[in-house]
Image (cartoon, rainbow, N blue to C red):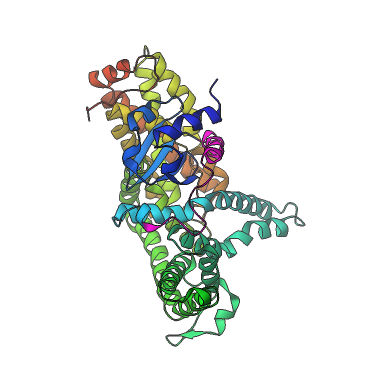
Amino acid sequence: MQTSHDLAAAILPLVGGPANVTSVAHCMTRLRLGLADPSLTDEPALRALPGVLGVVAADGTYQVVLGPGVVTRVTAEFEKLVPTTAPATGTPPEARAGSSLRGALRRIAAVFVPLVPALIGCGVLAGLNGLLVNAGLLPGLTPALASLAAAFMSLIAVFVGYNTAKEFGGTPILGGAVAAIVVYPGVAKVTAFGVSLSPGQGGVLGALAAALLATRVERWCRGRVPDALDVLLTPTVTVLVAGLGTLYGIMYAAGAVSSAIGTAANWLLASTGAVAGLLLGGLFLPLVMLGLHQALIPIHTTLIEQQGYTVLLPVLAMAGAGQVGAAAAVYVRLRHHTALRTTIRSALPAGLLGVGEPLVYGVSLPLGRPFLTACVGGAAGGAFVGFFAMLGDQVGATAIGPSGWALFPLLAGNRGLGTEAAIYGGGLLTGYAVGFAATYLFGVTDRVAAAATSAGSSGTPTPSRST
């Protein structure tokens, strides 16, 4: 039986060996590698490795899809094989993604991805605390649970600043120090543009911008301050200049942007809910395929900071429902393709819990058409949830990360848990049904069946050009 160490050891030479790896990280399903020279990778061999569900390669970043649980263990073993990865002050920009929009989104996503476990844990506790408060149970415990759930969110700006500086080539602790200004209670005594600032004004977007400014100031100082004075002057100038810029510019501007995001999200669903839900639910799977879905984390986090929940996540989660329905249809239609059906059986539980990448990379995307029909299912589920938003029934999530059935404990909104669960559950069932029907009727063509057959006993279908 293949162990996590065996899989890590098999992946390493196929990405150019230890000397080619500049950073190692992971999210819920993917091993994320920074590579000095992406041309040294053997992508076909990497995709063919047992245990590897897919590879996303763009802008010098390699994401090896391994699935939930497995990725955590493999990453730990991989780090043992690559003891010297990216330095604490961040990988030099020359070795990172380019200046394209996709590269910028990936780097911003890299700031927020490490925060997801804490967001999930605190969100679950917040949901549990809300249930206890509403039911009048354990009144002596609920204040403690509220503290556990809220503490991280009250200081999330510091973590965002730390990770931003680390990602963009600055000193992490200086990024955290400048970002901490955003949530410091004393800023209430500061007046900018004739208006007193509020602690937390600008939220995570302000923290991100503050740390980016701090990184720029620090790097400017490093090239001009004499070595003998660097340890004294560079941190001082960085905190002073970036800090004043944060107080007298960034917090005000980021606060306006954050408010606009909240207003726009609510207006979008309230005014064009069904159409917006259809588009968001239908287009989310391609974002997952490209690994760009993590770039939405700052928007979700901003909404959670402002309203206590994000109204976008339940809509986007419908994409996973369409994927589950499509995979089920492939399972039913291709009765004689044992290897593919085995893959679907093993990946469906994760799909039902909102982790759709094993199904995306192991089933629908290699087959071609089922990926598109899965998007149709996601669009239908999104339209269902969006329709009720137009009626004034908001359904949101108190944290990000989980989706599918795992999102039920995190649901929140303006109509009570029963209504929110009914709407969200109805959206899931709609996504399952439409994804199944679209795939059963239109997604499994002769070419798709041939592609599944050509997989043989490998369990991984070869890509079909049929769309």
* Camera-side residue of 453 and 280: 453
Please state the horizontal and vertical placement of residue 385, each as a whole percent of the image.
Answer: 41, 46
Asked whether 326 falls inside the magenta stretch, the response is: no
Query: Horizontally, is 411 left or right of 48 in the view?
Result: right
Q: Residue at x 40, y 37 (%)?
A: 15
Q: Residue at x 28, y 20 (%)?
A: 451
Query: Horizontally, is 102 left or right of 49 in the view?
Result: left
- Residue 219 in which image quadrant: bottom left
Asked whether 73 falls inside the magenta stretch, the response is: yes
Please state the horizontal and vertical placement of residue 241, each as a whole percent of the image.
Answer: 46, 79
Q: Residue furthest bottom?
A: 194
| Magenta residues, start to end | 68-93
Quadrant for the N terminus, please: top right
Please state the horizontal and vertical placement of residue 23, each as a whole percent of the image.
Answer: 46, 47
**Compared with residue 117, is residue 72 higher up or lower down, i.e. above or below?**
above
Is any part of residue 317 visible from this angle?
no
Is any part of residue 190 visible from this angle?
yes
- Residue 217 in which image quadrant: bottom left
Q: Residue at x 59, y 65 (%)?
A: 154
Please state the horizontal and vertical placement of residue 64, each as a whole percent of the image.
Answer: 42, 37
Q: Residue at x 33, y 29 (%)?
A: 44
Query: Horizontally, is 375 left or right of 63 in the view?
Result: left
Quadrant for the C terminus, please: top left
Q: Residue furthest right?
A: 140
